Image (spheres, helix red, strand yellow):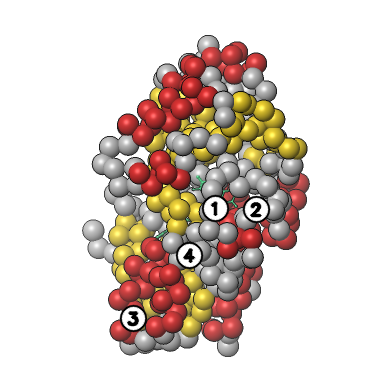
Amino acid sequence: MPPDQNITVDVAVIGAGLTGLTCAQHLQQMGYQVVVLEKSRGLGGRVATRRLPNAWADHGLAYFTQQGTQTAALVQLWRDRGILHPWINQDFVWADGILYPGEVSVQRYVSPVGITAIAKALAAELEVWRGQRVAAIAPTDNHTWAFTLEPVAGERVRELTARSVVVTAPAPQAAALLDPLQSQGVPPEFFSAVQSVTYQANLTAIALYPSARQVDLAQVPWRSVQLNHPQLAWVTVDSSKQPHPSQPIVVLHGSTSLSDQFLDAPDLEPAGQLLLDSAANTLLPWLADPEVLQLHRWRYALPRNPLPDACLSTASPLPLVCGGDWCGATATSMQPQITLPLSSPATISPIEQALTSGIASAQAVHRLIKP
Ligand SMILES: Cc1cc2nc3c(=O)[nH]c(=O)nc-3n(C[C@H](O)[C@H](O)[C@H](O)COP(=O)(O)OP(=O)(O)OC[C@H]3O[C@@H](n4cnc5c(N)ncnc54)[C@H](O)[C@@H]3O)c2cc1C
């Protein structure tokens, strides 16, 4: 299939997660022509909703909380627009064989149609090319960036050049894209900063149970349980986010050690069974037997060692900015043992970092390309 005609824009933003969409929105508001390039068909990146038969589950970010200036402003806006609704303000805790209510803390907000509603709202006015993986970026002789795009099956073959580029993929994926540019003028300290960031993985299971179990689940007081357990870290009842759930849907997040152990395993089924068995032994016996089980491996779930700056920028060889939840670390977010769930107001909020970094990245592009 021949490519669509090449178009040239002011800015190409790689990644339609919260960083990329926030950045693109701000740049568009400043008057720049922007295209967002996203390798997946869906929007939101780790703000992710999995569609199931007659249902859905949030298998990445489970909810929004007000944990900083940007998240506070957006929660307010999205509540006013009816996109976010209050959910719970308390997790339960399981430790040493005992399940008990944790402290009442921040209000958690969810969407009754799935958390990706947030990404869809952010992208509403943006030009997003979905299903277009950026395989390479390279400077051209006429001072623009050229993109090698690999469309997923069924998507159009397209061509794009841009005066500037913002890379918002998780740092290891950004480093892979930038690697060939080391010999083309990207400063070594820029590249080594991107390369230094590492991520914690998370193995997530989405379990759908028979409708008859809806009555049993309605009896239990918990909707979100943190576990001090060798295999299971966190369980949320995702069906409780929906106004009229017909079937229980439970999302189970593996512990750090289980997630690391199965990071490169060719078959995730044994890990899924371990998660189900752990939930059955700690919370409810019937959790061992779902009707449908889906597994997702988040290779880059949470940044372990985010950089201090809210974004990285350089004019060499051409305007280039990198941002994401791996930028703009606060003192607390430098804690090495970051684990899920992150619901305490005192703990780090990668989401706040992503939003802040998106705005900082837009401002950095503006400084680099303003007339
Ligand atoms: C299970 C889980 C639970 C979490 N819980 C919390 C929480 O409770 N609180 C909190 O604050 N944070 C939490 N997070 C983290 C939070 O979701 C992220 O910090 C945030 O969503 C990051 O947004 P981002 O835009 O920086 O990155 P991403 O969402 O990763 O977006 C990057 C985008 O770039 C795209 N991309 C990558 N490479 C390419 C390429 N070559 N071409 C085109 N597109 C590309 C990806 O497909 C993706 O859509 C959680 C994450 C996970 C996985």
Q: Amino acid at mark 1?
A: Ile
Q: Nearer the viewer, mark 1 or mark 4?
A: 1
The residue labelled by disc 2 is 347
Q: How packed is label 1: few (under 14 Cα within 10 Å), some, or many (20 or more)?
A: some
Label 3: state its secondary structure. helix
Label 1: state its secondary structure. loop
Q: CA distance from mark 2 to mark 4?
A: 23 Å
Q: CA distance from mark 1 to mark 3?
A: 31 Å
Mark 3 vs mark 2: which is more N-terminal? 3
The residue labelled by disc 3 is 182
Label 2: state its secondary structure. loop
Quarter of the image for the C terminus: give it. bottom right
Q: CA distance from mark 3 to mark 4?
A: 18 Å
Q: Nearer the viewer, mark 2 or mark 4?
A: 2
Q: Position of residue 109 (x, y in %)?
A: 68, 41
Q: Amino acid at mark 4?
A: Thr
Mark 1 vs mark 4: which is more N-terminal? 4
Question: Residue 35 got which mark?
Answer: none
Q: Amino acid at mark 3?
A: Gln
Mark 4 residue's CB less than 8 Å from ligand 1? yes
Q: Measured along the vertical axis of the image, is residue 206 above or below residue 283?
A: below
The residue labelled by disc 1 is 338
Mark 3 vs mark 4: which is more N-terminal? 4
Which residue: 47% across, 86% down?
Answer: 315
Q: CA distance from mark 1 to mark 2?
A: 9 Å
Q: Amino acid at mark 2?
A: Thr
Q: Residue furthest front?
A: 96
The residue labelled by disc 4 is 168
> Is disc 1 in contact with disc 3, using a CB cutoff of under 8 Å?
no
